[in-house]
Each structure stands twice: as C-alpha cells, then as structure tokens.
Image: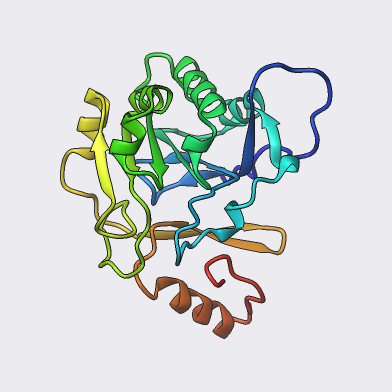
Amino acid sequence: MTGPGPDLGPELGPDSRPKLRLNRCHYPVTTLGPGVRAGVWVQGCTIACPGCAATDTWSSEPGAEVRVETVLGWLASLDGPVDGVTISGGEPFQQPDAVGELIAGIRAWAGERPVDVLAYSGYTLSRLRARPALSALVDACDAVVTGPYARNRPDGGWLRGSDNQVLTVITPLGRDRYGGDPPDGPRLQMGVEGERVYLIGVPRRDDLDRTAEALRRAGVPIEEASWRT
C-alpha cells in the first residue's frame, strides 16, 4: 500500500500550536532505514547544498503548512507494519517546534512498539549540539544523519549521500537498528503521485541520470527534475 499523504489544503481556524511545513508523506519506505517505514519530508531549507537531489523542498511555502496531528492521523491510518519513521526534507531542524511535536506524537502513537525515528539534517552534529533546542530534538530521535551533502565527495554508503555525512545512533533502539552492518537491498524506490514521479532513498553518483534515461526509454520523459538546477 502506498499512502498518498495528508491533504495539503489550507487549514482554517485559530491554532497556537506549531504547524509543519510539509512536502509529502510516503508509505511504505524501504530505502531510508531498516524495515518498513513511513517517510515524512518537510518543506523549507536554507542550506541549499549544491547538487541536492531535492531542490523542490527548499522553498518555505506557507501554503504547505499542516497541523502536526494531520500527519499523525495519516500515520495512524496506514494499513501495514511500521518499523520506523524517517524525517527528511528540506531541513527538519529548521522547524524544531513542529518536528519535536511530530516526534512526540509518533512516540505516543507507537506506545511500547519498537518504532524508531531517523532524522536527516544538513547541519553538522556539533552545530546542532551547540543550540539547546536543537540538541534536545536530536535526543528525541533514535538516530540522525548529519552534515551537508558534498557532491565532490565519494558516495557515503548506507543512508549517506556523501562520505562527510555522519550517522549517529542516539538510543538503545538506534544502536540495535543502525549499529550493525548495513542491510543488502536497493538504495532507491519510486513513488508516483498524479504526473509527479519521485525517487526515495540516497542515490549514488549518476543514479539519478541513469534513472531518468531508463524512464525515457520506457516512454516516460522527465520535463523537470529536482536535482537539475
């Protein structure tokens, strides 16, 4: 089952709780962490790493704001196993209040079940640790991948786009899920939403252009691509 994600239409009415700028949700995700996962991509990133594969997530579109409980409701509606939730973007740590509320809601929804939270950030871990609010958000996760994407660096391996990025485990569940040898399997999967085709995972060098060429040969030309600037 593929969860198309919550409705991103405007949400009216007063609400003092933080809203999440959201790009998309997807289920199942099998390339961004162990097991079968739910994926949440936030909208907005000012880091703007050259060569980023997700430039469509950079702008901070106010129209993409949703209540956190909307995302949690989508998560609770999924008809299938959820071993973990991966939060990427965009830059999750530029929305600490909303992402913190999201993670707290995931913990409440999971209860005693071992559902891990993996978050991506383009900031280094030392920079996140230097700010108490962001350091607390790191500690709310089970594992984090930190550091800017560097397109001139070799492939980073499992979960990392470049080898300067660092995978850090935070909790015992994180050590159990992320502390061993990386699993075998594909690094990319594909999602389709209307006329939009998106790739999920951490591509190796030239993976995106090879995928675009394979789609073209199959009669699916790509007119615009988020990794081409």
Judge left or right: residue 209 versus residue 182: right
Q: Is residue 105 placed above or below 129 in the rendered structure? A: above
What's the coloring here?
A: rainbow
Q: Which residue is drawn at 54% across and 48% down?
A: 45
Q: Which residue is drawn at 47% across and 36% down?
A: 93
Residue farthest to the bottom, as pictured: 217
User: Is residue 34 at all visible to an observer of this figure?
Assistant: no
Q: Is residue 159 placed above or below 95 in the rendered structure? A: below
Where does residue 127 sit, x and y in percent of width and height?
34, 37
Judge left or right: residue 46 versus residue 22: left
Query: In this orientation, which residue lies closer to the viewer: 196 or 19?
Result: 19
Judge left or right: residue 1 versus residue 143: right
User: Is residue 222 at all visible to an observer of this figure?
Assistant: yes
Residue farthest to the right, as pictured: 12
Where does residue 57 sit, x and y in percent of width and height?
58, 52
Q: Is residue 163 placed above or below 213 in the rendered structure? A: above
Where does residue 4 sit, x and y in percent of width and height?
64, 45
Residue 24, image quadrant: top right
Q: Work out which quarter of the rendered image holds the C terminus and state it.
A: bottom right
Where does residue 30 sit, x and y in percent of width and height?
41, 48
Judge left or right: residue 2 versus residue 180: right
Query: In this orientation, which residue lies closer to the viewer: 104 or 94?
Result: 94
Q: Residue at x 39, y 51 (%)?
A: 31
Residue farthest to the front, as pictured: 130
